Image (cartoon, rainbow, N blue to C red):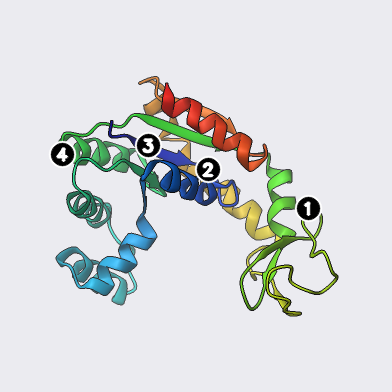
Amino acid sequence: MTLNIILLGPPGAGKGTQAVRLEEEHGMVQLSTGDMLRAAVKAGTPIGLQAKAVMDAGELVSDEIVSGLIGERLDQLGNDVSVIFDGYPRTAAQAEALDGILSARGRKLDHVIELQVEEDALVDRITGRFSCAKCGAGYHDRYKLPKVENTCDVCGNHEFKRRPDDNEETVRTRMAEYRAKTAPILPIYEARGIVTHVDGMAPIDEVNDAIETILAG
């Protein structure tokens, strides 16, 4: 059975981690609009060329282009591949466009899964993150320090780095943006009875189990 799901949640909620699990366990494909945009521009597809012209002019890519991008990617995948939408739709207009894109290809939206997080806990989770500068292994000031101080568990490197935007002000700004953008689309899907809320602060395996239960239903 082909599934079409939307994963919702603010940055740091664990959407990427869960999407990777679903790709590995079910052969689903994560459709991240940012990644698709970069890939289409690089490949020089008709929509990629359109998007490049808009971005080169310093303008925001329109809903029409993003929708075209989604349609183009779905056509490449074929109708027997299950997909995870990440970062789209963000507005009521995009939600309406997605309905049209799916129905034109004999698909329908099956589940909208929101990973819910507490803002203060998310700030703690993100601001404590750091990684090995060499191999990229991830660590945390409170939850996952290297076993040997200043030495990566994976490759033995002694240099670490932090993302410059992993600070409290940026995280709270992202949360506010997420609430503002997601607020208009949740009621649309709630009215259809396809929204399920999952505790995004639970351990990764528990979140994965909750999502598996939803998909099995």
Q: Residue at x 61, y 74 (%)?
A: 135
**What amino acid is at disc 3?**
Ile
> Disc 2 marks which residue?
9
Depth order, front residue of 3/53: 3
- Horizontally, residue 97 falls left or right of residue 124, namely left
> Disc 1 marks which residue?
143
Image quarter (top left, top right, bottom left or bottom right) of the C terminus: top left
**What amino acid is at disc 2?**
Gly
Residue 96, quarter of the rendered image: top left
Other residues around mark 1 within 10 Å, as few (<14) / some (14–19) / many (≥20)? few
- Horizontally, residue 92 falls left or right of residue 12, namely left
Label 4: state its secondary structure. loop
Q: CA distance from mark 2 to mark 4?
A: 27 Å
Image spot of residue 49 (x, y percent): 19, 71
Q: Are marks 1 and 2 in contact (CB under 8 Å)?
A: no
> Disc 3 marks which residue?
5
Image spot of residue 23 (x, y percent): 41, 47
Image quarter (top left, top right, bottom left or bottom right) of the N terminus: top left
Q: Are marks 1 and 4 in contact (CB under 8 Å)?
A: no
Q: Is residue 183 above or below residue 161?
A: above
